[in-house]
Image (spheres, grey):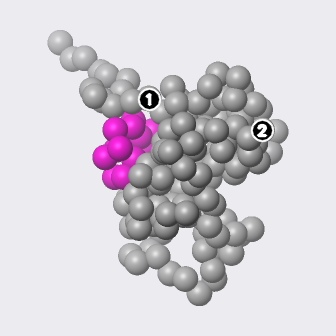
Amino acid sequence: MTIALEHPVDTIDPVTLVDREVMSRLVRRVTTDHPEISAETAHRIVGQAAAFVAASGRQSGQVLVPSELVDHGWHAFILHTVDYAAFCQRVVGRFVHHVPTDEDEQMLGGAAAAREQTVAAIQDAGYTVDADLWRSAADCNQCHAGCHDSPKDG
């Protein structure tokens, strides 16, 4: 007999980090901004954005980047500043800033290496990774060459 687990044992589903009412607002924002994304996928995206923020806030000094899809969730969350600030304080203990990458900044090892480093940090923080949402690193053209967390305290 084979048993398939929806989430690996001893990991936290990051969707549970986000209040239901906030989750609903963020899912609506993602699907409004990106009509090609279903509500179900947007829900998963917001959950992974929550895991990204939680892991980023705990990885001081390490640059982490969202995937292309997870970036949609992070940007939606940031737009809801009151909810985002409260989430950061509750889950991380401090505000996690969005820091655009300058055009001349290069991630060591490129986008794929940065994505792998981020996925590992999320797993190390104890959150379930939805691998289907982490297939490509974000290319934030409005953020020059990319977006990342604020690894410096403060």
Please report contact status of discs 1 and 2: CB closer than 8 Å, yes or no: no
Q: Which mark is residue 138?
A: none
Q: Secondary structure at mark 2?
A: helix
Residue 46 spot, x, y in % from top left: 61, 38
Residue 128 spot, x, y in % from top left: 39, 36
Left or right, 1 with respect to 83, comes to: left
Q: Main secondary structure of the magenta part?
A: helix
Question: What residue sits right under mark 1 in the picture?
Answer: 13
Instruction: Reply yes or no: does residue 124 show up in magenta.
Output: yes
User: Callout 2, which amino acid?
Assistant: Arg
Left or right, 119 with respect to 88, comes to: left
Q: Residue drawn at (50%, 81%), measured in percent from left and top?
A: 106
The answer to whether 16 is drawn above or below residue 66 in the figure is above
Question: What residue sits right under mark 2 in the picture?
Answer: 29
Asked if residue 12 shows in the view, the reply is yes
User: Callout 1, which amino acid?
Assistant: Asp
Residue 100 spot, x, y in % from top left: 64, 70
Identify which residue, 94 or 39, lies in the foreground: 94
Range of residues picked out in magenta: 119-133
Q: Residue drawn at (64%, 22%), measured in percent from left and top?
A: 20
Q: Secondary structure at mark 1?
A: loop
Instruction: Reply yes or no: does residue 28 show up in magenta.
Output: no
Identify which residue, 48 or 91, lies in the foreground: 91
